[in-house]
């Protein structure tokens, strides 16, 4: 059965709601950006800030500020890149690994408290579908990159103003 426009509209609204709720988790102490940075640095051992910015699709200057704060907190270490002395490599410290473990545990506890009563098959299904969705989204974004996000946003807003209901 192929999805129809109403099904896609319901999915879009549901996903927008979920995205909003997940963003709200930061006010509850679940810092997803820090967790993603630490996980990326831990997985890749020593990375550049530009690599992190590219993976997270954020402005490099915002990553630089976050990296500086994480270094001050002692959860990452900055070292000169031996291949390019002008560049800095970022790696996770033992405190950073402990923080990543704590953030992961907090998220696990949170999801357990929200959907822990679900059947194990349902949790596996949503995990599989969300992973599949994430992969599709990543592939789609690679096919349709946005070089200037602000210009793109202005173009969308302008299209709303000129659309006929």
Image (spheres, grey):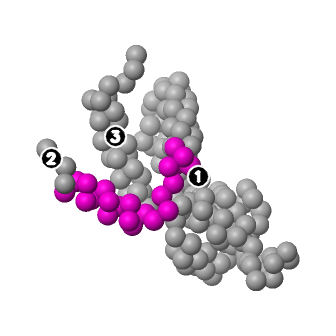
Q: Which residue is mark 3?
A: 12
Q: Nearer the viewer, mark 3 or mark 2?
A: 2
Who comes first in sequence, dot 1 or dot 2?
1
Q: CA distance from mark 3 to mark 1?
A: 29 Å
Q: Is residue 140 left or right of residue 101?
A: left
State whether residue 65 is above or below residue 13: below
Between residue 116 and residue 33, name the one nearer to us. 33
Q: Which mark is residue 105?
A: 1
Part of the protein shown in magenta: 140-161
Magenta segment, prevailing SS (helix, strand or loop):
helix
For the C terminus, the image quarter is top left
Badge 3 local density, few (<14 within 10 Å), some, or many (20+)? Answer: few
Between residue 7 and residue 17, name the one nearer to us. 7
| Quarter location, residue 117 | top left
The residue located at (32%, 60%) in the rendering is 155
Q: Nearer the viewer, mark 1 or mark 2?
A: 2
> Whole-percent x and y of residue 114?
42, 41
The residue located at (55%, 35%) in the rendering is 132
Q: CA distance from mark 1 to mark 2?
A: 49 Å
State whether residue 146 is above or below residue 63: above
Is mark 3 in CB contact (under 8 Å) with mark 1?
A: no
Q: Which residue is mark 2?
A: 164
Whether residue 149 is in magenta: the answer is yes
Q: Is residue 81 left or right of residue 113?
A: right
> Whole-percent x and y of residue 60?
56, 72
Numbered disc 3: secondary structure:
helix
Residue positioned most to the top? 1
């Amino acid at each position: 059965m192929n999805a129809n426009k109403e099904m896609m509209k319901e999915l879009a609204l549901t996903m927008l709601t979920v995205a909003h709720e997940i963003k709200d988790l930061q006010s509850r102490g679940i810092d997803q950006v820090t967790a993603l940075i630490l996980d990326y640095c831990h997985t890749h051992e020593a990375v550049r800030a530009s690599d992190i910015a590219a993976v997270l699709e954020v402005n490099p200057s915002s990553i630089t500020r976050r990296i500086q704060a994480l270094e001050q907190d002692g959860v990452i270490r900055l070292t000169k890149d031996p291949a390019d002395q002008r560049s800095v490599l970022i790696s996770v410290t033992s405190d950073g690994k402990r923080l990543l473990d704590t953030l992961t545990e907090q998220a696990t506890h949170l999801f357990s408290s929200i959907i822990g009563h679900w059947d194990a098959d349902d949790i596996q299904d949503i995990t599989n579908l969300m992973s599949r969705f994430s992969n599709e989204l990543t592939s789609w974004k690679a096919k349709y990159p946005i070089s200037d996000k602000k210009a793109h946003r202005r173009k969308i807003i302008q299209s709303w103003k000129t659309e006929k209901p």
